[in-house]
Image (spheres, rainbow, N blue to C red):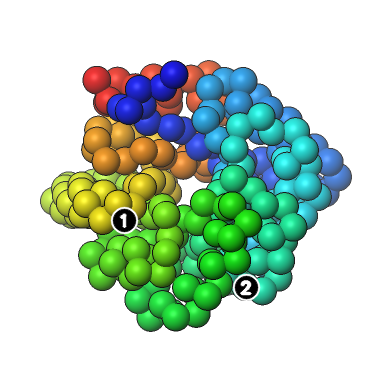
Amino acid sequence: MMSENYLRLGVNIDHVATVRNARGGDYPDPLRAAKIAQEAGADGITAHLREDRRHISDADIDGLMEVLSVPLNFEMAATDEMQKIALRHKPHAVCIVPEKREERTTEGGLDVAREENRLAHFIAPLRDVGCRVSIFIAADQRQIEAAHRIGAEVIELHTGAYCDAFAEGREEEAARELASLRDMSTFADSLGLEVHAGHGLTYDTVKPVAAFPEVRELNIGHFLIGESIFLGLTPAIVEMRRLMDEARK
């Protein structure tokens, strides 16, 4: 039985599919990566089915639902098409993210406050079929309050601004972003929301976020897939797990 202090690791396999799609064909297989990740200690698998299918495909989602023995966190935009796919599969968790065709990756959090009424109606059927609904947002009190009002059970705080500032040597900005993540984790927890975090986390940036006691799960993908080129996927995940556990002590 896991302790209350245990921090879950969700491994995002999107960019295994990115490499596959760069060449066409079936290799490397994201499902194989997902199976290796769960054997290496991942507590869940995250996959983002984008509207343009630039990496994960519908067939990948079908396969993941069949083979996984850990929960699937299905990332998606708030569109009718994606809602239908989620309602058909009924994954353990659905994370609603912003999505623009021209972006390289998810650039920021969802503006829940601006679309509160629409999103409340959008997530209700997902909750009705048993999916845990998460909203991917910036560490902003207004957005957290809106996510709470629409009935989300989970928020995932966007850690990208902190990670970018750290990587670029902007130490004061990184410290401010980290403080905001810490404060908003505490605030969200006080509302009864489960707090997750992710985006851009690396070995160098994970421990300060992992140390926040309110954070229950980290979702990490691009860095782990990149690091696996040099270390292998299992050692890359094992090292991330070690750093997370160390931060929790």
The residue at which mark 2 appears reads as: 79
Whether residue 70 is visible to the viewer of this picture, yes or no, is yes
Q: How many marks?
A: 2
Q: CA distance from mark 2 to mark 1?
A: 26 Å
Question: Badge 1: few (under 14), some or many (20 or more) residues near its Cα, within 10 Å?
Answer: many
Q: Nearer the viewer, residue 222 or 79?
A: 79
Whether residue 232 is visible to the viewer of this picture, yes or no, is no
Q: Quadrant of residue 81?
A: bottom right
Q: Amino acid at mark 2?
A: Thr
**Badge 2 vs badge 1, beta-carbon distance below 8 Å:** no
Q: Amino acid at mark 1?
A: Ala
Question: Badge 2: few (under 14), some or many (20 or more) residues near its Cα, within 10 Å?
Answer: few
Decide if residue 45 is on the left or right side of residue 63.
Answer: left
The residue depicted at 31 percent of the width and 56 percent of the height is 161
The residue depicted at 38 percent of the width and 61 percent of the height is 137
Circle 2 SS class: loop
Q: Quadrant of the C terminus?
A: top left
Above or below, 146 relative to 248: below
The residue depicted at 66 percent of the width and 29 percent of the height is 69
Above or below, 113 relative to 10: below
Q: Position of residue 104 (x, y in %)?
A: 54, 61
Q: Position of residue 244 (x, y in %)?
A: 35, 27
The residue at which mark 1 appears reads as: 161
Q: Nearer the viewer, residue 77 or 175?
A: 77
Q: Position of residue 122 (x, y in %)?
A: 55, 72
Q: Position of residue 50 (x, y in %)?
A: 64, 61
Q: Quadrant of residue 216?
A: top left
* Mark 2 vs 1, N-terminal side: 2
The mark lying in front, picked from 2 and 1, is 2
The residue depicted at 27 percent of the width and 26 percent of the height is 247
Circle 1 SS class: helix
Decide if residue 165 is on the left or right side of residue 158.
Answer: left
